[in-house]
Image (cartoon, helix red, strand yellow):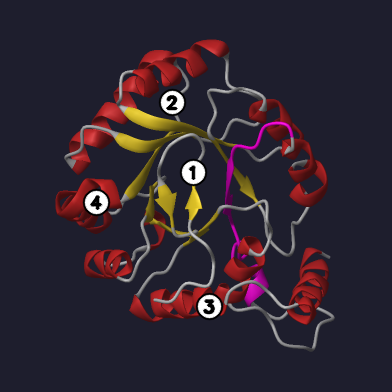
């Protein structure tokens, strides 16, 4: 893979990642997860739907070179003790002693201080290297960004929902956590013809290139289900950032999809 997007450094650590991440939720077979790793991808998201094959692949990849793979473990826990329990359970399943990123999932308002303190303690103990928070409410992100315990932010960003360009990105100038974009395809809506649109539609690869062409996005998550989709995503990554005419077309199409 000759990735045309520059690998990025995540937050305050020495972790460097190819900016296309792979999510566990879409059924990519375990041999294809390892194939993604062999092709150069190294950011893997152990999220809501944890397929056994994806977990087995992560375990083998970590044995091949733990320092070469960046693993995100998500927790939806809503109490301080549950955060630690959920992380420990996931680490046991993967045969790991730490995760690179602990993700506190779906906090539309900043997590209560006891939750943040518990997660931060796990980082201090070496059970996680960095803390990430996901959110669906864009005005919350600037507040999250001001907390120095938070190293990464996970947010919706795509051609149909580019509102982060207005509500989030301009507010990250003083302190800039790493940004991980998800729902790049707008739950596949950008991959289908829209009412009132008779032009070409976006491919999944186009969607990831749209996200990564923003200087504010460090990683875009993809969810291939098989080798063909994985290869298409890798080919798109090789194309690099959007040309101005591509950007204009995708934004226009995204406006139509959004309605």
Q: Is residue 187 magenta?
A: yes
Residue sitting nearer the eye, 233 or 187:
233
Which is nearer the N-term, disc 3 or disc 1?
1
Residue at (74, 79) in percent of width and height? 246
- The answer to the question of whether label 3 and label 4 lie on touching residues, with beta carbons closer than 8 A, is no
Name the residue carrying label 4.
55
| Up-down relation of residue 257 to residue 22 (above or below) | below
- The 10 Å Cα crowd at callout 3, few under 14, some 14 to 19, many 20 or more, is many
Residue 186 appears in the figure: no
Q: Find residue 189 and report its horizontal and vertical position in percent.
A: 65, 69
**Mark on residue 236?**
3
Name the residue carrying label 2.
77
**Mark on residue 10?**
1
Residue sitting nearer the eye, 71 or 28:
71
What element does badge 1 sit on? loop
Task: Give the residues drawn in magenta, as a range.
Answer: 174-191
């Amino acid at each position: 893979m000759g990735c045309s997007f520059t690998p990025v450094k995540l937050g305050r650590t020495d972790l460097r990642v190819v900016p296309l991440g792979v999510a566990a939720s879409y059924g990519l077979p375990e041999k294809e997860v390892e194939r993604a790793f062999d092709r150069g991808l190294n950011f893997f998201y152990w999220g809501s739907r944890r397929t056994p094959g994806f977990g087995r692949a992560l375990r083998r990849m970590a044995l091949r070179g733990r320092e070469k793979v960046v693993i995100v473990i998500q927790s939806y826990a809503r109490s301080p003790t549950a955060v630690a329990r959920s992380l420990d359970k996931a680490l046991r399943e993967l045969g790991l002693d730490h995760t690179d990123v602990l993700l506190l999932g779906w906090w539309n308002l900043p997590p209560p201080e006891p939750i943040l303190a518990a997660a931060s303690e796990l980082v201090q103990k070496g059970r996680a290297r960095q803390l990430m928070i996901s959110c669906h409410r864009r005005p919350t992100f600037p507040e999250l960004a001001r907390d120095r315990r938070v190293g990464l932010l996970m947010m919706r960003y795509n051609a149909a929902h580019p509102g982060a360009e207005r509500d989030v990105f301009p507010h990250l100038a003083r302190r800039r956590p790493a940004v991980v974009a998800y729902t790049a395809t707008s739950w596949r809506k950008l991959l289908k013809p829209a009412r009132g649109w008779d032009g070409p539609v976006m491919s999944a690869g186009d969607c990831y290139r749209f996200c990564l062409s923003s200087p504010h996005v460090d990683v875009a998550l993809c969810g291939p289900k098989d080798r063909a989709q994985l290869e298409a995503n890798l080919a798109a990554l090789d194309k690099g950032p959007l040309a101005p005419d591509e950007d204009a077309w995708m934004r226009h199409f995204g406006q139509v999809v959004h309605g």
